[in-house]
Image: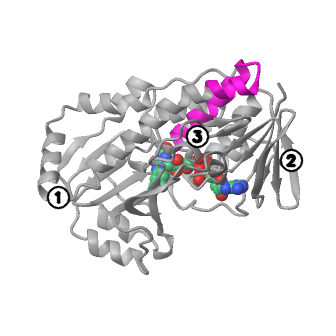
Amino acid sequence: MGNTAVVVGGGIGGLAAAIGLRRIGWDVTVLERASALADMGAGISLAANGLRALDELGVGGAVRAASRGQYSGGTRTPWGAWLARMDGSALEKAVGAPIMGIRRSTLHRLLREALPAGSLLMGSEAATVEEAGAGTVHVGYGASALEADLVVAADGIGSTIRGHLFPDHPGPVHSGSTVLRAITEHAVDLRTDFELTWGRGAEFGHIAFLDGKAEWHAVLGLPVGTRFADPLTELRRRFHTWHDPIPALLDATRPEAVLQHDVNELRTPLPSYAAGRIVLLGDAAHAMTPNLGQGACQALEDAVTLAAALGAESTVEAALARYDAERRPRSQAVARAARQAGRMGQQLSHPLAVALRDTAMRLTPSRVATRMILRHHAWSPPSLH
Ligand code: FAD
Protein backbone atom coordinates (compact mmCIF):
# COMPACT_ATOMS: atom_id res chain seq x y z
CA MET A 1 0.00 0.00 0.00
CA GLY A 2 1.16 3.58 -0.71
CA ASN A 3 1.65 5.99 2.10
CA THR A 4 0.52 9.48 1.12
CA ALA A 5 -2.56 11.13 2.60
CA VAL A 6 -4.41 14.41 2.28
CA VAL A 7 -6.36 15.43 5.35
CA VAL A 8 -9.16 17.87 4.54
CA GLY A 9 -9.75 20.08 7.59
CA GLY A 10 -7.30 21.39 10.15
CA GLY A 11 -9.50 21.16 13.24
CA ILE A 12 -8.74 18.94 16.23
CA GLY A 13 -9.73 15.79 14.31
CA GLY A 14 -7.77 16.59 11.16
CA LEU A 15 -4.59 17.61 12.98
CA ALA A 16 -4.76 14.55 15.22
CA ALA A 17 -5.23 12.30 12.18
CA ALA A 18 -2.23 13.90 10.49
CA ILE A 19 -0.07 13.34 13.58
CA GLY A 20 -1.20 9.71 13.80
CA LEU A 21 -0.49 9.03 10.13
CA ARG A 22 2.95 10.59 10.42
CA ARG A 23 3.67 8.37 13.40
CA ILE A 24 3.16 5.29 11.21
CA GLY A 25 5.42 6.77 8.55
CA TRP A 26 2.94 8.36 6.15
CA ASP A 27 3.50 11.54 4.24
CA VAL A 28 0.61 13.90 5.07
CA THR A 29 -0.68 17.25 3.85
CA VAL A 30 -3.48 19.01 5.75
CA LEU A 31 -5.69 21.42 3.81
CA GLU A 32 -7.51 24.01 5.94
CA ARG A 33 -9.81 26.45 4.23
CA ALA A 34 -9.66 29.12 6.94
CA SER A 35 -6.77 31.52 6.62
CA ALA A 36 -6.99 32.36 10.32
CA LEU A 37 -8.10 30.08 13.12
CA ALA A 38 -11.70 30.71 14.09
CA ASP A 39 -13.74 29.94 17.23
CA MET A 40 -10.65 29.98 19.41
CA GLY A 41 -12.18 32.13 22.15
CA ALA A 42 -13.53 29.03 23.76
CA GLY A 43 -12.39 26.19 25.96
CA ILE A 44 -12.74 22.45 25.81
CA SER A 45 -12.80 19.63 28.32
CA LEU A 46 -10.89 16.47 27.56
CA ALA A 47 -11.82 13.20 29.22
CA ALA A 48 -9.47 10.26 29.82
CA ASN A 49 -10.30 8.66 26.47
CA GLY A 50 -9.27 11.81 24.58
CA LEU A 51 -6.17 12.23 26.73
CA ARG A 52 -5.11 8.64 26.14
CA ALA A 53 -5.48 9.17 22.42
CA LEU A 54 -3.29 12.28 22.73
CA ASP A 55 -0.73 10.22 24.69
CA GLU A 56 -0.56 7.74 21.82
CA LEU A 57 -0.07 10.65 19.41
CA GLY A 58 2.86 11.86 21.53
CA VAL A 59 1.26 15.12 22.67
CA GLY A 60 -0.54 13.97 25.83
CA GLY A 61 2.17 15.24 28.17
CA ALA A 62 2.16 18.74 26.69
CA VAL A 63 -1.65 18.89 26.69
CA ARG A 64 -1.89 17.68 30.30
CA ALA A 65 0.73 20.24 31.38
CA ALA A 66 -1.32 23.04 29.81
CA SER A 67 -4.66 21.83 31.25
CA ARG A 68 -6.36 22.08 34.60
CA GLY A 69 -7.73 18.92 36.17
CA GLN A 70 -11.44 19.29 36.88
CA TYR A 71 -11.46 17.70 40.33
CA SER A 72 -14.30 19.52 42.04
CA GLY A 73 -17.76 20.60 40.98
CA GLY A 74 -20.87 18.95 39.66
CA THR A 75 -24.44 19.72 38.67
CA ARG A 76 -26.58 22.31 40.46
CA THR A 77 -30.00 23.90 40.42
CA PRO A 78 -30.28 27.63 39.58
CA TRP A 79 -30.51 28.45 43.30
CA GLY A 80 -27.29 26.54 43.96
CA ALA A 81 -28.40 23.21 45.45
CA TRP A 82 -26.23 20.28 44.36
CA LEU A 83 -27.92 17.62 42.23
CA ALA A 84 -24.72 15.60 41.76
CA ARG A 85 -21.13 16.12 42.81
CA MET A 86 -18.30 15.33 40.47
CA ASP A 87 -15.35 13.50 41.97
CA GLY A 88 -12.34 14.05 39.70
CA SER A 89 -10.12 11.97 41.98
CA ALA A 90 -12.44 8.95 41.61
CA LEU A 91 -12.32 9.35 37.83
CA GLU A 92 -8.54 9.65 37.95
CA LYS A 93 -8.31 6.49 40.03
CA ALA A 94 -10.59 4.59 37.68
CA VAL A 95 -9.33 5.75 34.27
CA GLY A 96 -6.05 7.50 34.94
CA ALA A 97 -7.18 11.10 34.53
CA PRO A 98 -9.85 13.50 35.67
CA ILE A 99 -11.53 15.62 33.00
CA MET A 100 -9.03 18.33 31.98
CA GLY A 101 -9.94 21.86 30.89
CA ILE A 102 -7.86 23.68 28.26
CA ARG A 103 -8.25 26.61 25.88
CA ARG A 104 -9.02 25.47 22.34
CA SER A 105 -6.29 27.79 21.03
CA THR A 106 -3.71 26.04 23.24
CA LEU A 107 -4.81 22.54 22.24
CA HIS A 108 -4.78 23.53 18.59
CA ARG A 109 -1.30 25.07 18.89
CA LEU A 110 0.08 21.94 20.56
CA LEU A 111 -1.35 19.77 17.78
CA ARG A 112 0.01 22.08 15.07
CA GLU A 113 3.44 22.08 16.69
CA ALA A 114 3.53 18.27 16.46
CA LEU A 115 3.46 18.52 12.66
CA PRO A 116 6.38 19.56 10.49
CA ALA A 117 6.32 23.12 9.12
CA GLY A 118 4.68 23.22 5.72
CA SER A 119 2.40 20.22 6.19
CA LEU A 120 -0.60 22.39 7.18
CA LEU A 121 -1.76 24.58 4.29
CA MET A 122 -3.98 27.36 5.63
CA GLY A 123 -6.35 29.20 3.27
CA SER A 124 -6.61 26.01 1.17
CA GLU A 125 -10.15 24.82 0.55
CA ALA A 126 -10.52 21.36 -0.96
CA ALA A 127 -12.99 21.92 -3.80
CA THR A 128 -12.97 18.45 -5.40
CA VAL A 129 -12.18 15.03 -3.98
CA GLU A 130 -12.38 12.21 -6.52
CA GLU A 131 -11.11 8.67 -6.79
CA ALA A 132 -8.72 8.87 -9.73
CA GLY A 133 -8.35 5.12 -10.34
CA ALA A 134 -5.11 3.18 -9.91
CA GLY A 135 -5.50 3.44 -6.15
CA THR A 136 -5.25 7.20 -5.84
CA VAL A 137 -7.52 10.07 -4.87
CA HIS A 138 -7.33 13.46 -6.54
CA VAL A 139 -7.88 16.56 -4.40
CA GLY A 140 -8.29 19.94 -6.09
CA TYR A 141 -7.85 23.12 -4.07
CA GLY A 142 -7.55 26.64 -5.50
CA ALA A 143 -5.47 26.35 -8.65
CA SER A 144 -3.56 23.37 -7.23
CA ALA A 145 -4.13 19.65 -6.85
CA LEU A 146 -2.72 16.72 -4.90
CA GLU A 147 -2.80 12.98 -5.57
CA ALA A 148 -2.83 10.70 -2.53
CA ASP A 149 -3.38 7.09 -1.53
CA LEU A 150 -5.92 8.19 1.07
CA VAL A 151 -8.11 11.21 1.83
CA VAL A 152 -9.20 11.83 5.40
CA ALA A 153 -12.35 13.95 5.42
CA ALA A 154 -12.08 15.85 8.69
CA ASP A 155 -14.06 18.78 7.32
CA GLY A 156 -16.45 19.14 10.24
CA ILE A 157 -20.19 18.94 10.75
CA GLY A 158 -20.95 20.65 7.42
CA SER A 159 -18.66 18.21 5.54
CA THR A 160 -19.09 18.56 1.79
CA ILE A 161 -17.16 15.32 1.31
CA ARG A 162 -19.75 13.48 3.41
CA GLY A 163 -22.48 15.02 1.23
CA HIS A 164 -20.62 13.80 -1.86
CA LEU A 165 -20.18 10.24 -0.51
CA PHE A 166 -23.70 9.96 0.93
CA PRO A 167 -25.93 12.23 -1.18
CA ASP A 168 -29.12 10.76 0.34
CA HIS A 169 -28.06 11.43 3.92
CA PRO A 170 -30.09 14.32 5.41
CA GLY A 171 -26.99 15.96 6.95
CA PRO A 172 -26.87 17.96 10.17
CA VAL A 173 -29.99 19.18 11.96
CA HIS A 174 -30.59 21.78 14.64
CA SER A 175 -30.81 20.35 18.16
CA GLY A 176 -33.25 23.05 19.27
CA SER A 177 -30.61 24.95 21.25
CA THR A 178 -28.27 27.91 20.92
CA VAL A 179 -25.00 28.13 22.82
CA LEU A 180 -23.31 31.34 23.94
CA ARG A 181 -19.85 31.14 25.47
CA ALA A 182 -16.74 33.12 26.28
CA ILE A 183 -13.49 33.07 28.20
CA THR A 184 -13.38 35.53 31.07
CA GLU A 185 -11.13 38.57 30.80
CA HIS A 186 -9.54 37.93 34.18
CA ALA A 187 -9.36 35.25 36.86
CA VAL A 188 -12.57 34.64 38.77
CA ASP A 189 -12.87 33.49 42.38
CA LEU A 190 -14.32 30.04 41.69
CA ARG A 191 -14.86 27.50 44.41
CA THR A 192 -14.95 24.61 41.95
CA ASP A 193 -13.21 23.59 38.74
CA PHE A 194 -16.32 22.66 36.82
CA GLU A 195 -20.05 23.25 37.19
CA LEU A 196 -23.21 22.68 35.21
CA THR A 197 -26.45 24.28 36.31
CA TRP A 198 -29.78 23.21 34.91
CA GLY A 199 -32.84 25.40 34.96
CA ARG A 200 -36.00 25.12 32.87
CA GLY A 201 -34.85 24.87 29.25
CA ALA A 202 -31.53 26.52 30.09
CA GLU A 203 -28.05 25.48 31.20
CA PHE A 204 -25.08 27.46 32.45
CA GLY A 205 -21.66 25.91 32.98
CA HIS A 206 -18.02 26.74 33.50
CA ILE A 207 -14.63 25.08 33.10
CA ALA A 208 -11.69 26.61 34.97
CA PHE A 209 -8.26 26.96 33.33
CA LEU A 210 -4.80 26.77 34.86
CA ASP A 211 -4.47 30.57 35.11
CA GLY A 212 -7.74 30.99 37.06
CA LYS A 213 -9.67 32.33 34.08
CA ALA A 214 -12.61 30.23 32.97
CA GLU A 215 -14.75 29.42 29.99
CA TRP A 216 -18.47 29.69 30.66
CA HIS A 217 -21.27 28.57 28.38
CA ALA A 218 -25.00 29.19 28.39
CA VAL A 219 -27.29 26.89 26.41
CA LEU A 220 -30.83 28.06 25.68
CA GLY A 221 -33.71 26.38 23.89
CA LEU A 222 -34.16 28.79 20.96
CA PRO A 223 -35.06 28.57 17.27
CA VAL A 224 -32.29 28.01 14.75
CA GLY A 225 -30.43 31.19 13.79
CA THR A 226 -31.26 33.11 16.98
CA ARG A 227 -28.62 35.79 17.59
CA PHE A 228 -28.71 38.52 20.24
CA ALA A 229 -27.46 42.00 19.32
CA ASP A 230 -26.09 42.39 22.85
CA PRO A 231 -25.65 38.82 24.10
CA LEU A 232 -24.02 39.71 27.42
CA THR A 233 -26.90 42.00 28.44
CA GLU A 234 -29.38 39.31 27.40
CA LEU A 235 -27.55 36.69 29.47
CA ARG A 236 -27.37 38.98 32.50
CA ARG A 237 -31.14 39.44 32.19
CA ARG A 238 -31.75 35.69 32.00
CA PHE A 239 -29.23 34.52 34.61
CA HIS A 240 -29.01 37.33 37.19
CA THR A 241 -31.01 35.31 39.75
CA TRP A 242 -28.89 32.17 39.31
CA HIS A 243 -26.36 31.15 41.95
CA ASP A 244 -22.77 32.38 42.30
CA PRO A 245 -20.43 32.41 40.42
CA ILE A 246 -22.70 32.76 37.37
CA PRO A 247 -23.23 36.55 37.61
CA ALA A 248 -19.52 36.97 38.46
CA LEU A 249 -18.48 34.99 35.36
CA LEU A 250 -20.67 37.21 33.16
CA ASP A 251 -19.28 40.33 34.87
CA ALA A 252 -15.73 39.16 34.15
CA THR A 253 -16.44 38.94 30.40
CA ARG A 254 -15.93 41.53 27.65
CA PRO A 255 -19.09 41.89 25.47
CA GLU A 256 -17.13 41.32 22.25
CA ALA A 257 -15.73 38.02 23.61
CA VAL A 258 -19.11 36.25 23.50
CA LEU A 259 -19.53 33.63 20.75
CA GLN A 260 -23.01 32.58 19.61
CA HIS A 261 -23.73 29.32 17.73
CA ASP A 262 -26.64 27.06 16.92
CA VAL A 263 -26.11 23.58 18.36
CA ASN A 264 -26.42 21.13 15.47
CA GLU A 265 -25.85 17.40 15.23
CA LEU A 266 -25.79 14.55 12.74
CA ARG A 267 -28.95 12.90 14.04
CA THR A 268 -29.21 10.24 11.31
CA PRO A 269 -26.26 7.87 11.76
CA LEU A 270 -24.13 7.25 8.69
CA PRO A 271 -24.17 3.72 7.23
CA SER A 272 -20.37 3.78 6.84
CA TYR A 273 -17.40 6.00 7.68
CA ALA A 274 -15.48 4.98 4.58
CA ALA A 275 -15.97 4.74 0.81
CA GLY A 276 -13.14 3.57 -1.41
CA ARG A 277 -10.04 5.45 -0.27
CA ILE A 278 -11.91 8.27 1.43
CA VAL A 279 -12.55 8.11 5.16
CA LEU A 280 -14.68 10.32 7.39
CA LEU A 281 -13.39 11.36 10.80
CA GLY A 282 -14.52 13.58 13.68
CA ASP A 283 -17.58 15.77 13.31
CA ALA A 284 -17.74 14.94 9.59
CA ALA A 285 -18.59 11.37 10.65
CA HIS A 286 -20.49 11.77 13.92
CA ALA A 287 -21.12 15.38 14.97
CA MET A 288 -22.88 15.14 18.32
CA THR A 289 -24.44 17.56 20.76
CA PRO A 290 -21.91 18.82 23.32
CA ASN A 291 -23.81 17.49 26.34
CA LEU A 292 -21.20 14.85 27.24
CA GLY A 293 -18.14 16.86 26.16
CA GLN A 294 -17.15 13.98 23.89
CA GLY A 295 -17.13 15.31 20.29
CA ALA A 296 -13.43 16.12 20.16
CA CYS A 297 -12.54 13.12 22.33
CA GLN A 298 -14.24 10.86 19.79
CA ALA A 299 -12.37 12.61 16.97
CA LEU A 300 -9.11 11.88 18.82
CA GLU A 301 -10.12 8.22 19.21
CA ASP A 302 -10.86 8.16 15.46
CA ALA A 303 -7.42 9.55 14.64
CA VAL A 304 -5.49 6.94 16.62
CA THR A 305 -7.72 4.06 15.48
CA LEU A 306 -7.32 5.07 11.83
CA ALA A 307 -3.53 5.25 12.07
CA ALA A 308 -3.36 1.91 13.91
CA ALA A 309 -5.57 0.22 11.30
CA LEU A 310 -3.44 1.58 8.44
CA GLY A 311 -0.32 0.41 10.28
CA ALA A 312 -1.72 -3.09 10.78
CA GLU A 313 -3.51 -3.90 7.52
CA SER A 314 -1.93 -4.59 4.15
CA THR A 315 -4.35 -2.53 2.04
CA VAL A 316 -6.05 0.86 2.52
CA GLU A 317 -9.42 -0.77 1.88
CA ALA A 318 -8.90 -3.37 4.62
CA ALA A 319 -7.68 -0.69 7.03
CA LEU A 320 -10.72 1.51 6.37
CA ALA A 321 -13.08 -1.46 6.84
CA ARG A 322 -11.40 -2.13 10.18
CA TYR A 323 -11.59 1.55 11.17
CA ASP A 324 -15.28 1.65 10.27
CA ALA A 325 -16.01 -1.50 12.27
CA GLU A 326 -14.12 -0.24 15.31
CA ARG A 327 -15.26 3.37 15.32
CA ARG A 328 -18.83 3.53 14.01
CA PRO A 329 -20.63 1.57 16.78
CA ARG A 330 -18.83 3.35 19.61
CA SER A 331 -18.98 6.91 18.26
CA GLN A 332 -22.63 6.55 17.25
CA ALA A 333 -23.49 5.17 20.70
CA VAL A 334 -21.75 8.14 22.34
CA ALA A 335 -23.67 10.50 20.02
CA ARG A 336 -26.95 8.86 21.08
CA ALA A 337 -26.00 9.17 24.74
CA ALA A 338 -25.10 12.86 24.25
CA ARG A 339 -28.48 13.55 22.66
CA GLN A 340 -30.21 11.75 25.52
CA ALA A 341 -28.20 13.74 28.08
CA GLY A 342 -29.37 16.95 26.39
CA ARG A 343 -32.98 15.84 26.52
CA MET A 344 -32.73 15.03 30.23
CA GLY A 345 -30.69 18.15 30.97
CA GLN A 346 -30.91 21.57 29.37
CA GLN A 347 -33.81 20.77 27.05
CA LEU A 348 -36.17 19.70 29.82
CA SER A 349 -38.52 22.62 30.50
CA HIS A 350 -41.79 21.29 31.93
CA PRO A 351 -41.70 22.07 35.69
CA LEU A 352 -42.89 18.60 36.69
CA ALA A 353 -40.34 16.88 34.45
CA VAL A 354 -37.60 19.13 35.83
CA ALA A 355 -38.63 18.33 39.40
CA LEU A 356 -38.66 14.58 38.68
CA ARG A 357 -35.27 14.74 36.99
CA ASP A 358 -33.77 16.73 39.86
CA THR A 359 -35.15 14.28 42.45
CA ALA A 360 -33.82 11.30 40.50
CA MET A 361 -30.39 12.92 40.28
CA ARG A 362 -30.28 13.69 44.00
CA LEU A 363 -31.15 10.06 44.77
CA THR A 364 -28.60 8.55 42.38
CA PRO A 365 -25.54 7.38 44.36
CA SER A 366 -22.35 9.05 43.12
CA ARG A 367 -20.76 5.67 42.32
CA VAL A 368 -23.64 4.97 39.88
CA ALA A 369 -23.16 8.39 38.25
CA THR A 370 -19.39 7.76 38.02
CA ARG A 371 -20.05 4.37 36.41
CA MET A 372 -22.21 6.03 33.75
CA ILE A 373 -19.46 8.54 32.96
CA LEU A 374 -16.83 5.81 32.87
CA ARG A 375 -18.69 4.03 30.10
CA HIS A 376 -17.50 6.80 27.78
CA HIS A 377 -14.16 7.68 29.36
CA ALA A 378 -12.81 4.14 29.72
CA TRP A 379 -11.15 3.56 26.38
CA SER A 380 -7.67 2.32 25.59
CA PRO A 381 -6.03 3.34 22.35
CA PRO A 382 -4.51 0.82 19.97
CA SER A 383 -0.72 1.09 19.86
CA LEU A 384 0.98 3.07 17.11
CA HIS A 385 4.40 1.59 17.82
P1 FAD B 1 -13.99 20.96 13.11
O1 FAD B 1 -13.40 21.49 14.36
O2 FAD B 1 -15.29 21.52 12.65
O3 FAD B 1 -12.90 21.18 11.99
C1 FAD B 1 -13.21 21.05 10.63
C2 FAD B 1 -12.24 21.93 9.87
O4 FAD B 1 -12.38 21.67 8.49
C3 FAD B 1 -12.53 23.42 10.06
O5 FAD B 1 -11.34 24.06 10.47
C4 FAD B 1 -12.97 23.88 8.67
O6 FAD B 1 -12.59 25.22 8.39
C5 FAD B 1 -12.26 22.88 7.78
N1 FAD B 1 -12.87 22.67 6.48
C6 FAD B 1 -14.17 22.44 6.20
N2 FAD B 1 -14.34 22.23 4.88
C7 FAD B 1 -13.11 22.30 4.32
C8 FAD B 1 -12.63 22.16 2.98
N3 FAD B 1 -13.45 21.88 1.96
N4 FAD B 1 -11.29 22.30 2.75
C9 FAD B 1 -10.43 22.57 3.78
N5 FAD B 1 -10.84 22.73 5.06
C10 FAD B 1 -12.17 22.58 5.31
N6 FAD B 1 -15.85 18.13 22.48
C11 FAD B 1 -15.14 17.64 23.53
O7 FAD B 1 -14.50 16.59 23.40
N7 FAD B 1 -15.13 18.29 24.72
C12 FAD B 1 -15.84 19.44 24.95
O8 FAD B 1 -15.80 20.01 26.03
C13 FAD B 1 -16.60 19.97 23.87
N8 FAD B 1 -17.32 21.08 24.02
C14 FAD B 1 -18.07 21.56 22.99
C15 FAD B 1 -18.83 22.71 23.18
C16 FAD B 1 -19.60 23.21 22.14
C17 FAD B 1 -20.47 24.40 22.37
C18 FAD B 1 -19.58 22.57 20.87
C19 FAD B 1 -20.38 23.08 19.72
C20 FAD B 1 -18.81 21.42 20.69
C21 FAD B 1 -18.05 20.92 21.73
N9 FAD B 1 -17.26 19.78 21.57
C22 FAD B 1 -16.56 19.28 22.61
C23 FAD B 1 -17.19 19.10 20.26
C24 FAD B 1 -15.92 19.47 19.51
O9 FAD B 1 -15.77 20.86 19.46
C25 FAD B 1 -15.97 18.91 18.10
O10 FAD B 1 -16.42 17.59 18.11
C26 FAD B 1 -14.58 18.95 17.46
O11 FAD B 1 -14.04 20.24 17.52
C27 FAD B 1 -14.67 18.45 16.04
O12 FAD B 1 -13.42 18.57 15.43
P2 FAD B 1 -13.28 18.27 13.88
O13 FAD B 1 -11.84 18.48 13.59
O14 FAD B 1 -13.91 16.99 13.53
O15 FAD B 1 -14.18 19.39 13.17
Quadrant location of residue 19? top right
Is 374 contained in the magenta span?
Answer: no
Mark 2 or mark 1: whose residue is earlier in sequence: 2
Q: Which residue is mark 3?
A: 63
- Mark identifier at residue 201: none
Mark 1 or mark 3: whose residue is earlier in sequence: 3
Quadrant (top left, top right, bottom left, bottom right) of the N terminus: top right
Q: Is residue 284 visible?
A: yes
Q: Amino acid at mark 3?
A: Val
Count neighbours of disc 2 (C-alpha within 10 A) and say few if under 14, some if 14 to 19, many if 20 or more. Answer: some
Q: Which residue is mark 2?
A: 146
Residue under the point 84% across and 28% down:
2
Q: Position of residue 71 (x, y in %)?
A: 36, 39
Colouring method of the image: one colour
Q: Comparing marks 3 and 2, which lies closer to the viewer? A: 2
Quadrant location of residue 301? top right
Tag 1–tag 3 contact (CB < 8 Å): no
Q: Secondary structure at mark 1?
A: loop
Q: Secondary structure at mark 3?
A: helix
Furthest residue in direction front, as rendered: 168
Measured along the vertical axis of the image, is residue 222 above or below residue 49?
below
Quote the CA–CA distance across marks 2 and 1: 54 Å
Measured along the vertical axis of the image, is residue 329 above or below residue 314?
below
Q: Is residue 70 visible?
A: no
Measured along the vertical axis of the image, is residue 196 above or below residue 218?
above
Q: Which residue is mark 1?
A: 350
Q: Position of residue 9 (x, y in %)?
A: 68, 50
Mark 3 or mark 2: whose residue is earlier in sequence: 3
Q: Amino acid at mark 2?
A: Leu
Q: Which contiguous range is marked in magenta?
A: 296-322
